[in-house]
Amino acid sequence: MTILSGRTRAAGFSLVELMITIVIGAILVSIAVPAYTTQIRKTRRTEARTAILDLASREERFYSVNNAYTDQQANLGYGAAGAVSGTSVGSGYYTVTVTFTAADVTTAPPTQATYTIKASAAGIQAKDTDCASFTVQETGKTSSLNSAGTDSTALCWK
């Protein structure tokens, strides 16, 4: 006859093992979430840059035919009526502003037509303090400002 001891070990995790697993998981999450958020912001920046460069190329195409720039969406081939300024790009994470001046041949020396297209971070993307706005001009010059208003072109347009 065999006598069984009164203690048998139950299968499963002890409380210490479970707490160690939770701590390791929390450490991994605390590293992964900020890295993921940073990558998402960079992706949104790319959408904004692409959108304003597309808009700039459409402005140049319009200028080559009409010898003037425009801020009307329909004139630029977007199909929608209204001004380009104030529209959202980059899935709504940036707002576009277009400013242009017409050529003036009556002044000495005559001034040429110019435009500046600016995409400013909006909504949750406004938390992107490194690249708060992107700008492109008729000369092709690109620039960017951080939320403090200082130049961040090297970081944001790479």
Image (cartoon, rainbow, N blue to C red):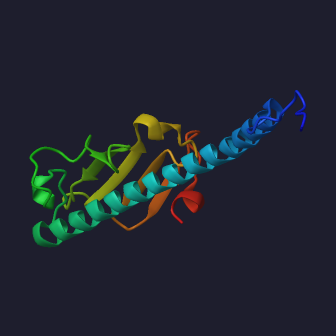
Look at the image and tell me in which quarter the C terminus lies: bottom right
- Residue 14 picture location, percent across and down: 80, 34
Q: Nearer the viewer, residue 67 or 85?
A: 85
Residue sticking out furthest to the front: 1
Q: Quadrant of residue 7?
A: top right
Give the residue displayed 41% in from the left and 54% down from the top: 135
Give the residue displayed 41% in from the left and 35% down from the top: 123
- Residue 126 picture location, percent across and down: 47, 38
Asked whether, in this view, residue 90 is left or right of residue 145, the answer is left
- Residue 115 picture location, percent across and down: 30, 56
- Residue 35 picture location, percent across and down: 62, 50
Q: Nearer the viewer, residue 113 or 97?
A: 97
Give the residue displayed 59% in from the left and 39% down from the top: 148
Q: Quadrant of residue 95?
A: top left
Position of 64 relative to 29 (above/below):
below
Residue 102 in view of the camera: yes
Asked whether, in this view, residue 107 is left or right of residue 94, the answer is left
Residue 109 in view of the camera: no
Asked whether, in this view, residue 97 is left or right of residue 67, the answer is right
